[in-house]
Amino acid sequence: MTSLLKHLNNRIYWLFIADILSVCVASFGWLLIRFDIFDIPADQFRTTMIYLLPDIGITIFVFWIFRLYHTVWRFASLGEILNLFYSVLLVDGIELLYKQVVLTQVMPRVPWSFFIVAPMLLFFCSTFARMSIRIARRYLNDQHHPHHKRKTMVIGGGTAAYMLINEMALNPGAENQIVCIVDDNPAKQGKYIRGIKIMGDRSQIHHLVKQFNVEEIIIAIPSASSKTMTKLVEICYETDCRVRRLPYIANITQGSLSENIRDVSYEDLLSRKPIDPEHAGIRDKLMGKVVLVTGGAGSIGSELCRQIAAFKPKQLIIFELNENSSYRLLVELKKKYPEVDVRILIGSVRDMSRLEYVFSFYKPQLVYHAAAHKHVPLMEDAPGEAIKNNCKGTLNICQMADKYGVEDFLLISTDKAVRPTNIMGATKRIAEMVVQYYAHHSSTRFVAVRFGNVLGSDGSVVPMFIKQIEEGGPVTVTHPDITRFFMTIPEAVSLILEAALLAKGGEIFILDMGKQVRIYDMAEKLIRMKGYRPGADIKIQITGLRPGEKLYEELLMDEEGIQKTENDLIFVGQPITFDEEHFLSKLSDLFAAATRNQPDLKEQTSELCETYQFTENRGGLWDEDDE
C-alpha cells in the first residue's frame, strides 16, 4: 500500500479518501432513509458493516477502470459526469450480483431498497466531492487573483458562444465577466448558458448595456455574414463599449478561444457576401507548371504566390525589384510549402536583357504580371516613371512571353484604367491595350483582369486611417462624398486565378466588387472600431480632391459592354478596337519622351489613351486609392 501511495499525487489521494467516505455515506445513509435512526435493526447494521470493505474495494476498482482518478475535474463537463454515473451503475450491478446471488448461502440478504437508494447517494456524494475541488480552486484563485473583470455581453447563443463562456468560467485569470447574452433566435431567449441568461435579441443591446453596466461586447457568431456583422457592429458602436469578435473556430491554430478574440476589422464589414470561388480546374492548370509572377513581393503579387504555391506548381519564379520583401516572402513560402521549388529573381521589368535571361533559362508556362507603379499622387509627380514601368515594362514582358511560347499571360489591371483622370490609370489602360495587341498577334493567351481597391495592401487607405487614429487624428478625407470599390486581397487573387481559367485571349475580365464604399463612412467606422467617437474624440478633416482624383470609380467603359461568365463574380468586357499601327508608333514616341523626361508626357499619353483627362501637377502626399 505504501509503494502504491508513492505513485499517487495528492489529488488522487484525496479523491480516494473522498470516495471511501462516499461509500460509507451511501451505505449508512441507506439505513437512515430506510429505517428511523433509533429503530435501525441490529442485523441490518451488522450486515452493512460486513459489506462495507468489499463495497469500498469494488467502488475504487470500478472508478479506477473508468479513469475517474485521472480526469481533470477542473474542466469537467457533461461527458465526465455521465462517465461517473455509468461507473456507479456498474458498482451497483456488481453489488447486486454478489449480495443477492453469489453469497446468499453464507451471508444475509440485503433489502432491495439498498440497490436503489445507495447508488443515488454514492453518485451524489462522489459528484459533490469532485465538484467541490472545482469550487475550492475557483475560490482560492479568486483570492489570489483579485483583479477587476470587464463586464461583458456576448452576442450569440450557439456552440461558439457556449465554448467561449465555458472557457472563461473555468479560467480564473480571464479578464471578462460574462453578465448577459443576446441572441435573435426566439427559441433561445429566456434560457441559460452556464447560468447566464439569454436576455433578448439585438434590439435589447442598448438597454442591457445600461442595466448590467457592460464595458465590452463580444460577437460570438463566427459564421455571421458581412451584412449581419455590419448591422451588429453599428448597433454595438452606439453604446460606446469596446467591440470584439470571435473568429472561425476552424481558423484557430493555437491558444484558447479567449486568446483569439480580436477587434472587429474593416474586412468584417464589407457590405456584401463573402466570396468563396470554386477552385475546380485551377489545380489542374497550375500543378506541375513553371509559373512566373512579376512584382511577386507586392501586396497582390505576394498573395498570388501564396495561393499558386498551394496548388503545387513545378516551379514558382518570383520576379521582384524589392529584395527585402522578396526574402521575407521566400522564407514564408519555404516554411509553408517546402515541397515547392520557389525561386526569387531580383530584377526590373524595364530591364530587357534581364527578362531575356529569365525567360530563356526558366521557360515559364504561365505569367502573372503584377509589377507596376500604383500610387496615384506619386505618379502624378513622376509621369515618366509610370510610363517606363507600367507601359514599357508590360511591353517588354509581353514580348518575352510571345517569344518563348508562354501558354497564358495575365495582366493585373485596375478600375482607374477606365476613363482615367490620372497618369497611373492612363498607363494601366495603355498596358491593357498592349496586352490586347499581343492577343491578336500571338499564340499565347493574353488577358487582363481589372478590379478596384484592395484592403490591407501597401498604401491602402485603411492602414493610413488607423495610423492617423493612433496618433490622435485628424483623419483626412479628400471629399465627403468620395467613394471606392473594395475587396480583400485573398478574394481578389482567388478570382484572378479563376478568371485565368476562362481566358480565350484578348479579354478584359472585370471582378464584381459589390457596392462602392463611401470613404467618409469608412473613416467613421474605423474610428469607432478603435473605441473612439468620430468628431468628438477623433476629428475627420476634409482636405479637398487632389489632381487626378475621381469622386467615384468605374470598372467598365460604355463601349466595352459586359458579358456574364460561368462565375457570377467575374464578367468580361469586349475589347475596344484601335488602330494598331498608330498605337505602336505613338507608343514608341511616348517611350522616347519618357526616357528624356519631357514636360509634355501627359499630353502625349492622352494621344494614346483618348479617354485620359489629365490635370497639371500640383503635388500631393496621399490618396484614398489602393492598388
Image (tube, grey):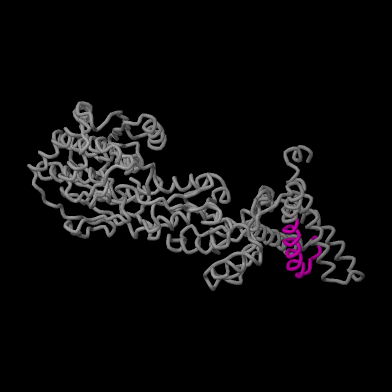
Q: Is residue 482 above or below residue 316?
A: below
Looking at the rendered image, the quarter that the N terminus falls into is top right
Rendered residue at 43%/60% (across/down): 226
| Residue 156: % across, % down | 54, 63
- Give yes or no for residue 107 being in the magenta stretch: yes
Rendered residue at 36%/32% (across/down): 326
In the figure, is residue 57 to the left or right of 461? right
Region rendered in magenta: 106-129
| Residue 111: % across, % down | 78, 69
In the figure, is residue 116 to the left or right of 423? right
Looking at the rendered image, the quarter that the C terminus falls into is top left
| Residue 55: % across, % down | 77, 56
Closer to the camera in the image, 134 or 196: 196
Would you say residue 38 is visible in this rendering? yes
Q: Residue furthest right?
A: 38
- Give yes or no for residue 559 being in the magenta stretch: no
Q: Is residue 428 above or below residue 550?
A: above
| Residue 153: % across, % down | 60, 61
Closer to the camera in the image, 450 or 14: 450
Q: Is residue 362 above or below residue 607?
A: above
